[in-house]
Image: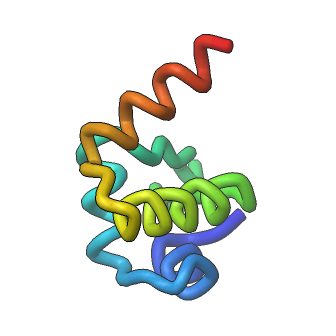
Amino acid sequence: MLTVSELSKAAQTTPDAIRHYVRIGLLIPSRDPDNGYRLFSADDVKRVKFIRRAKGLGFTLRDIQTIFDHSEDC
């Protein structure tokens, strides 16, 4: 499991971007029961990398959320 800082390094983005993605619902971390830290998985690294690539192609965060919503329906 990764913290915000570790996820940001692995996905080559900023911790603020990770926190923003959590606030708007693109990422849903678990919580460490001992300290309350947000914890992320290896799948979240892939998800953030996808978000970054999609943004680079001109997709908005709302578009990306729609893509995620449709992919979860399958």
**Is 69 or 22 nearer to us in this picture?**
69
Check the picture and name the quadrant holding the C terminus: top right
Residue projecting furthest to the top: 73
Q: Residue at x 52, y 85 (%)?
A: 12
Q: Is residue 31 left or right of residue 19?
A: right
Tell me the quarter of the picture where residue 71 sits: top right
Tell me residue 65's x, y (percent): 37, 36
**Looking at the image, residue 7 lies above or below residue 59:** below
Q: Is residue 16 left or right of residue 7?
A: left
Tell me residue 67's x, y (percent): 46, 32
Q: Is residue 34 visible?
A: no
**Is 70 or 5 nearer to us in this picture?**
70
Tell me the quarter of the picture where residue 1 sits: bottom right
Name the colouring of the figure: rainbow
Residue projecting furthest to the front: 57
Q: Is residue 68 left or right of residue 15?
A: right
Q: Residue at x 25, y 39 (%)?
A: 62
Q: Residue at x 55, y 87 (%)?
A: 9
Q: How many marks?
A: 0
Q: Is residue 21 visible?
A: yes
Tell me residue 5's x, y (percent): 48, 82
**Looking at the image, residue 49 lies above or below residue 64:** below
**Is 37 or 16 nearer to us in this picture?**
16
Q: Residue at x 56, y 45 (%)?
A: 30
Tell me residue 2's x, y (percent): 64, 69
**Looking at the image, residue 71 lies above or below residue 65:** above
